[in-house]
Amino acid sequence: MRKRAGKILTTEELRLLFTSGFVSPRDRALFGICLFTGCRVSEALALQTTDIKGGTLTFRKSTTKGKLKTRVVDIQPGLAALLVEYQPSPGALFPGMRGRSLTLTRFMADKILKAACERVGLFGVSTHSFRRTALTQMSSAGIPLRHIQEISGHNDLGTLQRYLEVTPEQRRKAVAAIGF
């Protein structure tokens, strides 16, 4: 049986999480990267400080699912502000606890998110919610699927489409476009 997909977050839910849920610049930067790049939390956790340069974020193929290709994503102003607020030492962008792991673990990222959601009263949110939210927002904004595929690193458009949610408003607009 497949796990339930992470909830797609509304603008208000995102605002709540980033203003009241996440309590540290590190946590806002981590989940900001997941949101503003559409990456998986494991990809964000594998980033090095050297992967941020020239207004871009580089996800090396060795750290992506499938390990097929490196992808470079532009850093937009909302993410840039979160990264400026978070000032890590050179090395792993999200270092782990001394002696336990080189980087923050997915388990710890899950715990951080769960605590943030409890603080603001959100339910059904997972680390994958940020990826699904980002990809759905891009699709809703009319960004061509091929462009979203480049950003997300999906090899297959069919897999990408499973991430996207169609809202009642989008269905109404689609039907309203029909006619002569």
Image: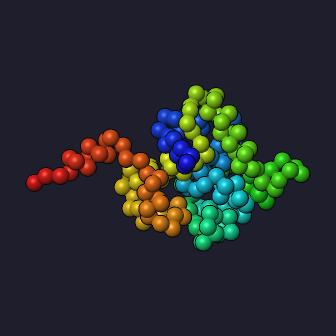
Compare residues 53 and 176 and report the one nearer the observer. Answer: 176
Q: Please tell me whether residue 171 is drawn above or below residue 93 in the rendered image.
A: above
Where does residue 92 sit, x and y in percent of width and height? 77, 57
Position of 40 compared to 104: left or right?
A: left
* Residue 167 in view of the camera: yes
Q: Quadrant of residue 73?
A: bottom right
Nearest the viewer among 106 and 18 is 106
Which residue is outermost to the left?
180
Q: Tell me the quadrant of the picture where the C terminus can be found.
A: bottom left
Q: Is residue 78 visible?
A: no
| Image quadrant where residue 102 sits | bottom right
Q: x, y (%) of residue 141? A: 38, 52
Q: Residue furthest front?
A: 1
78 sits left or right of 108 in the view: left
Residue at image location 32% in from the left, 40% down from the top? 168
Q: Position of residue 163 (x, y in %)?
A: 47, 52
* Residue at 76% in and 50% down: 104
Q: Residue at x 64, y 28 (%)?
A: 119
Q: Please tell me which residue is depicted at 39% across the width and 58% down the height of the picture.
A: 143
